[in-house]
Image (cartoon, rainbow, N blue to C red):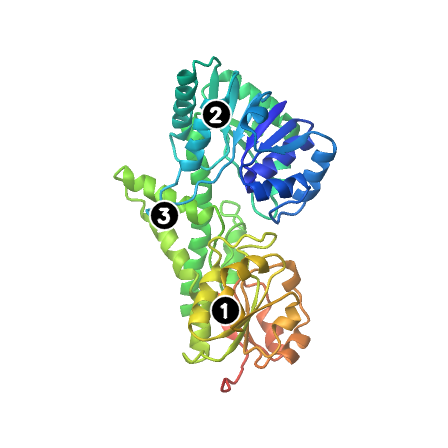
């Protein structure tokens, strides 16, 4: 098929690259000149495993191209995917200005019948608003053409987005048009051997499904973090509890890992948007409000634990951070727990040494003053990061940090203390090696005498 994907961000690029890989001809429309120049050179502007290879392969085969020309990009498009950002307003509601601006532009430039598909995460009723904007534009121009608008929300995990797109758990198609449903079923056929993975429903249900899925996963995370807080008071190891409840197939083991909070571009934003939607309709979303509050509180756990360990005297200490991105496999720092910790440490006068395989450039851009005055040091090597440190904090569980040479690390540190923000280390093993171990919802193990800064 001939496709146009509007927006060369995270969702748009993955969508364009994967459809092109299956033999469709895809034009990706992007207005940012710098990003467009990068893409035309075959350079992927975001960190996502496997994406650059797919982009370059599609360009070399002549099935994927990038443009800022609306008329040319839409000229042959049978299906147009809208994949632009929907950030949060101050009140938590989704900001639809980019989506509606695209709809207005489509009304100005479309000259033939086609299917427009919302891939962006949008509130219930957005497909109807997009259709209205497009049709108003067409009527104002006296243009002909039948336009269907469908909802097809993405369910991509950063760090594994290519695999999620190529081997989806489900594909949600929101439309009341049988023709639109058949078009999308045909387009997605190469990705699903079992057609039952394609679920066709009303557009409003599809839009709500996206929010419901992310809100439920966020709830599981906040629920286990709530239990971890209680475990800490009862001398119970949350990891043992997690394994015990996760073996129940009704619960499952996914998204019940205690940690220092969730971040990223989806969960925080979508939970806020769903809360705001409920409030706008006079409905009190008590569980979602608790999920959001627990997550904000959870992001302060690491700093509070450090402060408690050092008796409230942190100024002049050296703290090493392993992991800055909100999750492994990405350079995304949006709503990352590391930022809450970094802000608190820098404000407390701590010298921070930080290491991350992908997010250092983003941190450098965010903290130029701390870098310039030497309070923040960014390290490519995890062992250089811990030199002279009074404590090591694991924030993001990159594979590089999962099995380090802990005897070597101990020899480099000033004080052998580990704060495990993802509960990936074995407390007894670290204790045997001479460390004091702190995990989330786990009893401290080992000993370490606190010396002056």
Q: How many marks?
A: 3
What residue is shown at x 53% (from left), y 70% (from top)?
372
Where disc 1 sits, the SS reads: helix
> Residue at position x 68%, y 76% from top?
408
Label 2 vs 3, first from the N-terminus? 2
Q: Is residue 97 left or right of residue 16?
A: left
Occupied quadrant, residue 434: bottom right
Give the image location of residue 181, x and y in percent: 52, 21
Question: Marks 3 and 1: in contact by CB < 8 Å?
Answer: no
Say which of marks 1 and 3 sits in front: 1
User: Is 100 in front, or is 402?
Assistant: 100
Give the camera-side residue of 236 and 75.
Answer: 75
Where does the image place residue 424, in percent across and percent down from the top left?
Answer: 58, 63
**In the figure, is residue 142 to the left or right of 371?**
left
Where residue 162 appears, as percent x and y from the top left, is 63, 41
**Distance from Cα at disc 2 to Cα at disc 3:** 35 Å
Dots 2 and 1: beta carbons under 8 Å? no
In the rendered structure, the answer to whether residue 184 lies left or right of residue 408 reads left
- Residue at position x 52%, y 16% in the image: 113
Q: Are marks 2 and 3 in contact (CB under 8 Å)?
A: no
As displayed, is residue 235 above or below residue 245?
below
Question: Compared to 235, does 275 lie above or below?
Answer: above
Q: Secondary structure at mark 2?
A: helix
Residue 351, percent across and down? 51, 75
- Sequence-wise, which precedes: disc 2 or disc 1? 2
Find disc 3 in the rendering and name its residue: 288
> From the image, which quarter does the N terminus lie in?
top right
Rendered image: mark on residue 106: 2
Is residue 260 visible in the rendered structure shown here? no
Q: Which circle marks residue 370 in the picture?
A: 1
Instruction: Describe the element under mark 3 as helix, strand or loop.
Output: helix
Q: Please determine whether, in this image, residue 420 is positioned above or below residue 111.
A: below
């Amino acid at each position: 098929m001939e496709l146009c994907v509007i927006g060369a961000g995270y969702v748009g690029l993955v969508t364009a690259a994967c459809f092109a890989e299956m033999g469709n001809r895809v034009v990706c429309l992007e207005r940012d000149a710098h990003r467009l120049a990068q893409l035309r050179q075959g350079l992927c502007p975001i960190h996502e495993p496997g994406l650059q290879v797919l982009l370059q392969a599609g360009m070399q085969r002549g099935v994927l191209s990038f443009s800022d020309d609306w008329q040319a990009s839409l000229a042959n498009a049978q299906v147009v995917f809208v994949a632009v950002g929907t950030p949060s307003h101050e009140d938590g509601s989704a900001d639809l200005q980019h989506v509606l601006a695209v709809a207005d532009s489509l009304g100005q430039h479309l000259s033939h019948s086609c299917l427009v598909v919302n891939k962006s995460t949008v509130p219930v009723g957005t497909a109807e608003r997009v259709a209205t904007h497009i049709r108003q534009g067409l009527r104002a121009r006296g243009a002909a053409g039948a336009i269907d608008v469908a909802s097809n929300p993405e369910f991509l995990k950063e760090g594994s987005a290519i695999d999620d797109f190529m081997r989806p758990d489900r594909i949600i198609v929101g439309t009341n048009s049988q023709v639109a449903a058949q078009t999308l079923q045909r387009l997605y056929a190469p990705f699903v051997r079992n057609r039952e993975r394609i679920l066709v429903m009303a557009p409003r249900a599809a839009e709500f499904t996206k929010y419901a899925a992310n809100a439920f996963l966020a709830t599981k995370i906040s629920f286990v973090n709530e239990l971890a807080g209680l475990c800490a008071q009862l001398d119970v190891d949350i990891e043992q509890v997690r394994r015990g409840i996760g073996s129940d197939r009704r619960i499952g083991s996914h998204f019940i890992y205690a940690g220092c909070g969730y971040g990223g571009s989806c969960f925080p934003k979508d939970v806020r948007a769903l809360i705001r939607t409920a409030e706008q309709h006079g409905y009190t979303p008590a569980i979602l409000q608790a999920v959001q509050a627990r997550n904000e509180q959870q992001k302060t756990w690491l700093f509070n634990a450090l402060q408690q360990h050092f008796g409230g005297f942190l100024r002049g200490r050296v703290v090493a951070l392993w992991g800055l991105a909100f999750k492994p496999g990405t350079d995304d720092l949006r709503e990352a727990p590391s930022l809450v910790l970094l802000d608190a440490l820098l404000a407390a006068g701590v010298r921070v040494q930080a290491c991350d395989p992908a997010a250092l450039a983003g941190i450098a851009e965010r903290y130029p003053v701390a870098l310039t005055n030497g309070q923040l040091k960014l390290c490519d090597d995890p062992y250089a990061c811990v030199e002279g440190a009074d404590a090591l904090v694991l924030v993001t569980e990159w594979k590089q940090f999962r099995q380090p040479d802990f005897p070597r690390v101990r020899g480099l540190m000033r004080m052998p203390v580990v704060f495990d923000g993802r509960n990936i280390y074995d407390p007894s093993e670290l204790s045997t090696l001479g460390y004091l171990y702190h995990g989330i919802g786990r009893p401290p193990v080992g000993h370490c005498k606190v010396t002056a800064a």
